[in-house]
Image (cartoon, rainbow, N blue to C red):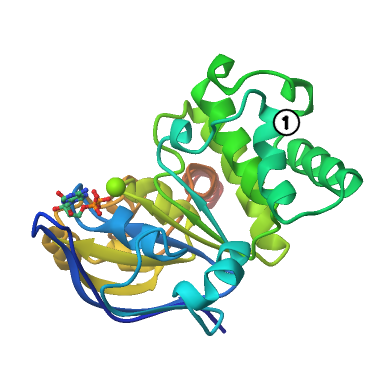
Amino acid sequence: MTAIETIGLSYVYPDTTPAFKEVNLQIKAGAKTAILGINGSGKTTLIYHLNGIIPAQQGEVKIQGLTVDKKHMQEVRKKVGLLFDNPDDQLFSTTIFNDIAFGPRNLKLDPATVNQRVKEALDRVDMAELAQRPPYCLSLGQKKRAAIAGLLAMKPQVLAFDEPFSGLDPEAAVHFRNILDQLVDEGATLVYSTHDVDMAYGWADEVIMMKSGKVLACGEYDLLRDEALLREASLPMPALAKLFKNHEEKPRTVEEAQAIIEGTKLLSQHQIIRLDIEK
Ligand SMILES: Nc1ncnc2c1ncn2[C@@H]1O[C@H](COP(=O)(O)OP(=O)(O)O)[C@@H](O)[C@H]1O
Ligand SMILES: [Mg+2]
């Protein structure tokens, strides 16, 4: 099933810089889709179209069949949770609690339901103990988690995240990925922008490759083994794809690669022992 569709979507900034042209996409529901591209490819501008922050100039965006336009904006904003690259653009209240409560209060939910939503969202991102802190007292990882909690309190079905892992240390990135995996397991659709080919190779279900405002290709994560395509996108090949290029097995994670290498070592030891016996 398709969660997000763009039809002939083009956008030119007021200063006449074109962001992208004729973008036609169908993004699968319940999957993790990475929009991959170097700086200036058009990723952020595209993500901003998914909840109407940037209204379509030419062409159309549909979320679960609903056109993103003025008429449907309220419904669209309920469906799509948009995460900015910089969480400081998202957090503006005096405390994390108030920040997360902002959306549910806007929906005019009663105070008990608002409290419940905030509590659930904070628990999801492991931040219950920081509810009363002002946002500026948090680390970047905590700010990103607080910004996500603010989105989760709205119970969105589509998560559109701009560079969600940028600036996070490796441990925070793993934590963040686990939170997102859980949301996708529960049925959410995740579309996120990145230039990290290794992370996309190991983690995304689908990829959209962009360069200079054009979609070069879209399909399953294994597009990231296509050398010609990567060259066209000015992106490097993921390290594991490169290492196992001439290998029958194609591990996506270091753990899988390790198991294959250790298996091969065991096999070769076994073969040596057999050769010894046969002698
Ligand atoms: N506010 C803006 N005004 C003018 N041009 C912009 C603006 N924001 C982005 N651009 C331009 O639009 C193109 C796409 O940018 P962007 O969507 O930010 O790409 P990415 O997120 O892939 O780096 C680039 O050429 C960029 O310079
Ligand atoms: Mg960007």
User: What percent of the width, then of the height, locates residue 48?
Assistant: 38, 58
Which residue ends up furthest to the right in the rendered image? 112
Residue drawn at x 24%, y 66% is: 226
In the image, residue 23 sits, relative to residue 207, either above or below, namely: below
Q: Amino acid at mark 1?
A: Phe
Give coordinates of residue 141: x percent, y percent: 54, 28
Which residue is at the front of the view, 139 or 63?
A: 63
Which residue shows up at 68% across the image and 39% down it? 100
Picture layout, residue 111 above or below residue 86: below
Number of on-image labels: 1
Whether ligand 2 has any atom under 8 Å from the Cβ at mark 1 is answered as no
Residue 141, compared with residue 148, is above or below; it is above
Helix, strand or loop for disc 1: helix
Whether residue 279 is visible: no
> Which residue is found at the position 17% from the left and 58% from the top?
13
Q: Is residue 264 above or below residue 29?
A: above
Q: Locate the N terminus and report the quarter of the image it occupies.
A: bottom right
Q: Identify the residue under disc 1.
A: 97
Residue 75: percent from left, percent from top: 61, 71
Mark yes or no: residue 138 visible.
yes
Left or right: residue 269 versus residue 5 is right
Q: Residue furthest left?
A: 16
Tell me which corner region of the image, top left, top right, bottom left or bottom right, holds residue 219. Answer: bottom left
The residue nearer to you, when weighing 28 against 159, is: 159
Residue 112 horizontal/vertical position (percent): 91, 44
Depth check, front residue: 116 or 279? 116
